[in-house]
Amino acid sequence: MAQHQVNYMQDGGLPVALTSIDKLVNWGRSNSLWALTYGLACCGIEMMASGASRYDFDRFGTIFRASPRQADIMIVAGTLTKKHAEFIKRLYDQMTEPKWVISMGSCANTGGMFNTYATVQGVDRVIPVDLYLPGCAPRPESLQYAVMLLQKKIRSQKAIKTQKPKRLM
Amino acid sequence: MQNTNRLRPFFENITFDRDDNELVLNFGPQHPSAHGQLRLMLHLQQEQIVKAHPDIGYLHRGMEKMAENMIYNEFMPTTDRMDYIASSSNNYGFALAVEKLIGLEVPRRAKVIRMMLLELNRLMSHIFWLATTALDVGAMTVFLYAFREREYLMDIIEDYCGARLTHAAIRIGGVPLDIQDNFIYDLKVFLDKLPENMKDYEDLLDTNRIWLMRMENVGIIPTEMALSWGCTGPMLRASGVEWDIRKEEPYELYDEVEFNIPVSDKGDNYARYKIYMAEMRESAKILYQCIDMYAETQKNNQTELMAHAPQYISAPKLDIMTQNYSLMQHFVLVTQGMRPPVGEVYIPTESPKGELGYFINSQGGPYPYRLKLRAPSFWHTGVLTDLLPGHYIPDVVSIIGTTNIVFGEIDR
Amino acid sequence: MRAYTPKENVQKKAYYTDRYWVAPQVAKFDVESDAVFSEDLKAIKDAKITVLEAFIQVDQMVVYIKPEDNVATLELLRDECGYTQLSELSAIDWISKRGGFEVFYQMLSMTKRKRLRIKCFIDEKQPIESVQSLFRSADWAEREMYDMFGVIINNHPFMKRILMPDDWEGHPLRKTYPLQGDEFAAWYEVDKIFGKEARDIIGPEIRDTARVDRYDTERFARLGHEVPKGAEFNPDQEKTPLAYQEDDGVFLIEGFEEDKSQIIRDRKR
Ligand code: SF4
């Protein structure tokens, strides 16, 4: 029977690191951001593309989930219309804390080119947004960048939030 | 604090426990396999659907209204956002309608480039269709493979027009740019590899038991239903009607290229799948011919890209930069917009999804008086009302998948 | 006093039109010039349907009929003349000029490869008979027409709004309806989700596309100068670093090192 000797001090052995709970929790949170598929329009296609072969979000721990209850971030990709507005709020409320929102594309940011009667002029009128990603449609790379910025934001927060809850009302 | 009770339960006016044992199931509007924001109200007897009410409008962005408030050229980028999987085909439909309205003839090289773009878009759309439908049915591998090819196509288009998704690559009166040097080379690389890729997909799907069970004899659309519901494109051809606008009412140079129209008389999901696959091969065939046609225009030195009609179309950039009158004309056309003659047109084109028609009523002003977008997916969603009853819940997903609906185009 | 602006058409209008400019017309041709169309027109006339006007424009025949005759005409065209598909149906708003709507039916015959357009004029409040018993596609198209224009349709099985929410007010494609919506539209989502009390907190929509407000920290922060939402604007604020990873690296995660990574020059692989 072969005997293995593990030198814990050596590189490549089991890592031992000292850290604070805050950091550990945030490390876990920021590197497994499960996103709610919220493809609403054209940007949703780019969101799909970023989950697909070339851009492959799964590498970064961003896995798309179809249920709000399993998701940490909501990537609002596309035009939010007035008819749809109540559903986005409903789904946002169903997500468990902690939760973050990326508003992807100019439509979700400000209504974009659709300055009409039927579109909500920015999802931040309905749900609180953490990160605005400009572009029409933003490339998958920029969505990647947005997620990375969000990771950074998460790491800079306290694990147990003392700041006031992100609520519009 | 948040007032949680404002959003009342959605079904407050629907009794779940009804005497007739019917269950009402709400599907969407945010459902991963609804291809967008489709909401279906399904009345169920056990697992079987007895009544279906598709509810649309969750992506209604008021495009027709926007068109009434925009000059014609300004509206072009908005058409991208209709069928956002194949944007150029929307651009093209609109450009063609306006050209017919003012009676323009587009130079030959522009026509060839347009045809290339159209067919590239068709390929892109069909590959995307394959990817998403396969994903909905559970074939993740096909999704990953198909997106690989789609990215390649996107690169080609991006090299041409600079955008991946929203191309705005076609102008009224022609195309803005000549294709870049490596376009033909890249295209050839892609086309040469396409049969191999298609074989990959078909190997994965054609004999796959799950795929066959969910596709064969599911969602049969009889010919009468397809005609009566205004189905067009692959949906109609799968139901046994040989009708392709490219062939029957040829526009651009489609009467010069050789291609077949795949038709099936089965009308089920599998027939539609087969038709999409066959159409991809036909598109590749057309693209090969377009490459030759392009070489021919090069040989004949036909370098014009925009129609010459100073009243409606700006002069080429070189003229604008060098000639005062062209600059003035350009300025007027950009600030005030072109004024097509008084009249009406309805111009259908064969978009990847079906008949994409633009109805324009012009009153001689720079803004259209009325612009109606006839989007194929609108009717392909409508047909679900009659199609779904009798099917089971799992079939809903595969049927929605094969109808190839895109919500930007349904709700406009 | 404020200048009076006419309300009957609030769509954008050309800001300048030459006084002597006469709009050209798209050519209209006689129906006789096309054998197929003249036969169809004859069939319509033979069935005692009043044809008010008929011509060919851009290769398609346009026939004006009376609104009462719409079902009869469409049935005739479908059964006798081979126009088996109703590809489009909608209305044009002429309320301010002529006090009503023009309804058009766009038909397609696949055997003859011809398209024609049946048009009729109805008054604003005058109902029109549904054609969905002939063509199922009219089911949704008529609902859309009702939704967008408020055209009343008789004998439709499920007359509800289709694109706009059920509790919407107004008919968006009428010329009197502004592009950016009316008061009701502006507050629709706020009223519905949070209630009218929330209007003050959430504030009005910002519709001015050219609006730039660098003191606004409620909506966007400038890149590199991020501040918490709602914080006071401070012009001397320190720059925030833009690198997406903290300088000392992230716990247990290897940083990206450019010189050690393989860079793909050809994207198309
Ligand atoms: S931002 Fe542009 S691409 Fe994205 S949903 Fe809006 S219109 Fe579509």
Image: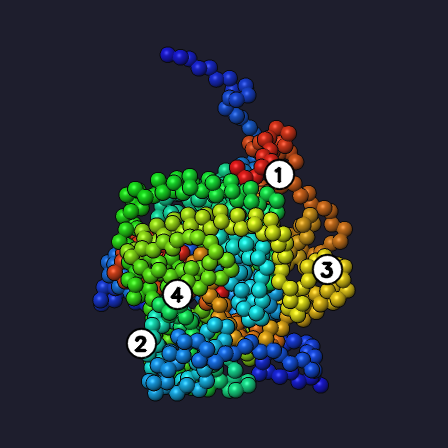
Image coordinates for residue C57, horizontal then vertical, percent:
50, 76
Q: Are marks 1 and 2 in contact (CB under 8 Å)?
A: no
Q: CA distance from mark 2 to mark 3?
A: 55 Å
Residue marked by disc 4: B379
Image depth: mark 3 or mark 1 in front: 3
Mark number, residue C80: 2
Q: Are marks 2 and 3 in contact (CB under 8 Å)?
A: no
Q: Secondary structure at mark 1?
A: loop
Q: Are marks 4 and 3 in contact (CB under 8 Å)?
A: no
Can you identify the residue that label 3 sits on? B319
- The residue under the point 64% across, 29% down is C259
In the rendered structure, which amino acid carries the disc numbered 3? Asp
Dot 1 corresponds to which residue?
Answer: C245
- In terms of image quadrants, where is residue B171? bottom right
Query: Badge 3: few (under 14), some or many (20 or more) residues near its Cα, within 10 Å?
Result: some
Q: Find the distance from the CA under tag 4 to the CA under tag 3.
A: 45 Å
Label 4 environment density (alpha carbons within 10 Å; few <14, some 14–19, many ≥20): many
Are marks 4 and 3 in one subunit? Answer: yes
- The local secondary structure at tag 4 comes to helix
